[in-house]
Image (spheres, grey):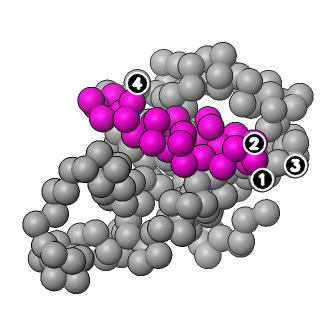
Amino acid sequence: MLAPLSFRPSPARAALHDHLMQHAAGTSNDEFLAHLISGWTLGEGMLPADFGLGAEGFGALIARHFPGLVWRPKADLAEVPTLHPEFEDLRRFLAEEADPSVDGSGEFACIVATACMGDDHLWQDLGLPTRRELSQLIALNFPALAEANNRDMKWKKFLYRELCQREGIYVCASPSCEACTDYAVCFGPEV
């Protein structure tokens, strides 16, 4: 169970989330998926209708986490995001970091990589209610990455930085984050 929200979600979001959780299988990712579905249904985020998993993959994920629930979103209700050239590298990187003991972590690698193609903060592109849920989602599904982000860098920036460093690409000219003129861009509050 996630820690209580520090804000009050809209009545529609709260009702949809509660309805979904009544059908939850009891796995650790159920609540994150309920947040994603609630956000998507209300037009939040940039995920496609299948969350980037394809219809079959999405259907299997819903069946595992919300057995008995029939939820077939219309694909034409959400735009299909443009997958940038780094998408597959990012998806693979996240899949390698996914905790195999957590049901759904492999799918979340693809979902998070898909949301990284958006233009807003990652939590917003996922349709989550706040950044806190994203941090909890990462801690559950990608614990080594959560541990490595020990200074609370914005998640999308952190994931791209980690991917680039893994590939031996160092784009920051500053010797350390503290010396960088863009420090507030990477570590400042998300608004």
Q: Nearer the viewer, mark 3 or mark 4?
A: 3
Residue 53 against residue 127 in the figure, above or below: above
Horizontal and vertical percent for residue 11? 67, 57
- Range of residues picked out in magenta: 83-112
Q: Which mark is residue 103?
A: 2
Residue 44 against residue 142 in the figure, above or below: above
- Any part of residue 115 in sight: no
Q: Nearer the viewer, mark 2 or mark 3?
A: 2
Quadrant in the picture for residue 183: bottom left
Name the residue that disc number 1 marks.
Answer: 28
Horizontal and vertical percent for residue 124? 44, 53
Residue at 38% over, 65% down? 154
Q: Say if mark 2 contacts mark 1, CB within 8 Å.
A: yes
Name the residue that disc number 4 marks.
Answer: 80
Horizontal and vertical percent for residue 95? 54, 39
Depth order, front residue of 9/161: 161
Q: Nearer the viewer, mark 1 or mark 4?
A: 1
Please report whichever mark, 3 or 4, sits nearer to the chain's N-terminal start.
3
177 part of magenta stretch: no
Residue at 59% over, 72% down? 7
Three-letter amino acid code of the residue under disc 4: Val
- Any part of residue 65 in sight: yes
Please report whichever mark, 2 or 3, sits nearer to the chain's N-terminal start.
3
Q: Nearer the viewer, mark 4 or mark 2?
A: 2
Name the residue that disc number 3 marks.
Answer: 26
Q: Dot 2: few (<14), some (14–19), or many (≥20) neighbours within 10 Å?
A: some
Three-letter amino acid code of the residue under disc 2: Asp
Q: Secondary structure at mark 4?
A: loop
Three-letter amino acid code of the residue under disc 1: Ser
